[in-house]
Amino acid sequence: MTTWQPADPEATRELGRRLAGILRAGDLVVLTGDLGAGKTTLTQGIGAGLGVRGQVASPTFIIARAHPSLGEGPDLVHVDAYRLQSLAEVDALDLDSSLEDSVTVVEWGEGMVEGLAEDRLEVMVGRPRGGLRDADEVADAGARTVTIHAHGPRWEGVDLAAALGADPAG
Ligand code: ADP
Ligand code: MG
């Protein structure tokens, strides 16, 4: 388990760009955290780091959006599972090919997508304790904590702290 504290949205994006540097086709990243924590912001950085087409955004109606790679790297498939309520709905997204050929990033996937892949990064995005109190302030500027747990043989021996480095500056 490794934790970073990006001080602002740009620092969170930079962390995502660095993360993209170690991601390859077939990798799954599961993002957990409250609304406004910074999951999509982190995914924007991953998309930028992979060099994919299209703006990574919070989907309103779309649950899964594919961002084709503009270069040699893998495509990004960005899933927002917020509106999904059952494993059957996750199955219906048919992520199998994405989980083989693309980098798959799932927001709100905890408790639903763990069964999809033994190898995965579980990323928790949150606000430091003792921080903001009411919901209006959740999207406020300020530091976040980003904690990454690596699961499965794919990540054995990968030193995330070394690979991603110290806290990114904004
Ligand atoms: P989520 O996808 O988790 O709901 P978003 O990434 O869409 O969250 O939104 C995060 C909000 O918090 C944005 O408005 C962003 O500008 C703001 N923010 C403030 N500080 C940070 C930070 N350090 N990292 C990420 N987002 C931040
Ligand atoms: Mg989001």
Image (cartoon, rainbow, N blue to C red):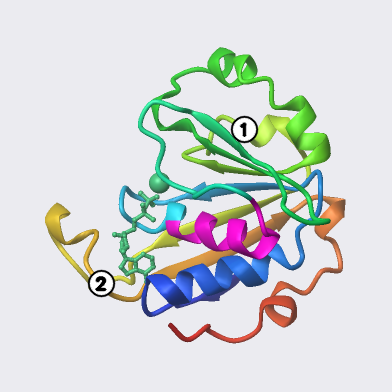
67 vs 39, left or right, is: right
Residue at 74% over, 77% down: 163
Magenta stretch: give its range: 41-52
**In the image, which disc is placed on residue 141?**
2
Q: Quadrant of residue 67?
A: top right
Q: Is residue 87 magenta?
A: no
Q: At label 1, which amino acid type do we have?
A: Val
Instruction: Name the residue that disc number 1 marks.
Output: 113
Q: Given this view, does label 2 or label 1 mark the residue nearer the observer? A: 2
Find numbered disc 1 in the image and state the secondary structure of the residue it sits on: loop
Q: Residue at x 45, y 54 (%)?
A: 39
Mark 1: few/some/many CA within 10 Å (<14, 14-19, 20+): some
Q: Is residue 51 magenta?
A: yes
- Res 116 → quadrant: top right
Q: Residue at x 60, y 62 (%)?
A: 48
- Viewport quadrant of the N terminus: bottom right
Image location (x, y in percent) of residue 76: 66, 45
- What distance separates the C-alpha of mark 2 from that of mark 1? 30 Å
Say few, some or many: other residues with alpha carbon within 10 Å of mark 2 (under 14 / 14 to 19 / 20 or more).
Answer: few
Describe residue 21's horizontal placement relative to residue 31 as left or right: right
Horizontal side of residue 96 vs 76, given as left or right: right
Q: Quadrant of ligand 1?
A: bottom left
Q: Where residue 122 appears, x then y in whole percent?
A: 61, 52
The first of marks 2 and 1 along the sequence is 1
Name the residue: 34% across, 76% down.
Answer: 143
